[in-house]
Image (tube, helix red, strand yellow):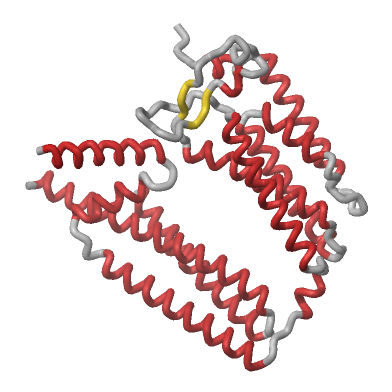
Amino acid sequence: MFFLLREVAGWLLVVASLFLIRECMLFLESRQVIEAGVLSMAAIGIFRGGIHLIRAATAARICLKSQRVSELD
Amino acid sequence: MNSESPNLQLFKQPASVIMYGLTTTVLAVIMWTILPQEETPIPFVLLPLFVGFLLFLRVWTIALLVLLFLVVLILNEPSRYDQQMQPDAILFAAGMLVFVISACRFYVSSAPLVNVKQTPLKSTRFFSWEHWKPSRVPHSIQPRHAQHFTLAEVWTGLLRACFTLAITMVLLWLVPLDLRSVQNVRLTPSGLRAIVLGISLFFIVMLTSGILSLFAWKRLSPSEARVYLKSTLTDFLHTDLRMYIKQKLKQRRARLKGQ
């Protein structure tokens, strides 16, 4: 359950980073380069954080699955 | 029998708790009354006062102060945005935040502490807060007994704050501080096109590689996943555990070499 929450949080962070990227492109359309630069840095950080959470959750799920299989054997 | 360290016992005394509570209240009132005044910039004189209080405050009170500080800043942001920002206010805020964050980093990462040899001077109440110091060469893992910042942590925080202040002052000197100037910055169409294409390409590559690596990630073997989990979960918060594992690995390698 804990790792499931972690994965959901990771996907939410990825979605949030996509939203920030969209905002960043809107800034660029209106030629506001500085604002776009700041937002792009934030988007990259949030995206990497989200991916990290998903990876940890996936690895934990694989570990739990292998543990259950070994217990059944 | 009480097995806690003398420092912890000292900080649990009722008189100390009352003193910390009073100083916290005074600081909160000062911030609450001075910051909302639009005409008054944050006085620089408060910086040594804050630093002096921080030396004697416990961690949770500092966290509370930082939260209050942020809440006041956020509440006043709409009224302050239209005005020209004061350089000394920016310097003050930057220095304070860097100092507190860099000092808190030690606490969060729970660096192992070594017991400094007691001297008659250090056994007094005033100097007792430097009883524990972070160890640079960990021969053994010790739990952190002190619930407050040590001398080394405070000095590191101050050093980083001074460094940041110096850089901020140079930047403020180079760039005129006017919020409207940010909105007036415009590039030529060709320069803008290059930037837009570059950023678009970067985002596309980042998203594609990130999503694709996630699908590949699900094919990890259980042993690989275990290694990744161990290294990840002991990476950021548990530095003491990480050091312990590294030390064990080093010993095992040395043993294997000897065989």
Left or right: residue B193 compared with residue B42: left
Name the residue furthest front. B258
**Which image quadrant for residue B1?**
top left
Please name whichever residue, B15 or A72, is drawn nearer the observer in this view of the structure. B15
Left or right: residue B255 compared with residue B11: left
Q: Work out whether B39 lies above or below B101.
A: below
Q: Work out whether B40 lies above or below B57.
A: below
User: Which residue occupies 62% across, 69% down?
Assistant: A38
User: Which residue occupies 63% across, 82% down?
Assistant: A28
Please name whichever residue, B174 or A34, is drawn nearer the observer in this view of the structure. B174
User: Which residue occupies 39% across, 36% down?
Assistant: B240
Name the residue furthest top. B1
Q: Position of residue A48 (x, y in %)?
A: 45, 64
Left or right: residue B28 compared with residue B232: right
Quarter holding the C terminus of chain B is: top left
Q: Position of residue B2 (x, y in %)?
A: 47, 10
**Total count of labels:** 0
Q: Position of residue B74 (x, y in %)?
A: 74, 54
Q: Work out whether B24 lies above or below A38.
A: above
Q: Position of residue B164 (x, y in %)?
A: 67, 52
Left or right: residue B181 compared with residue A51: right
Name the residue furthest right. B39
**Which image quadrant for residue B119?**
top right
Name the residue furthest left. A73
User: Which residue occupies 19% across, 54% down?
Assistant: B222
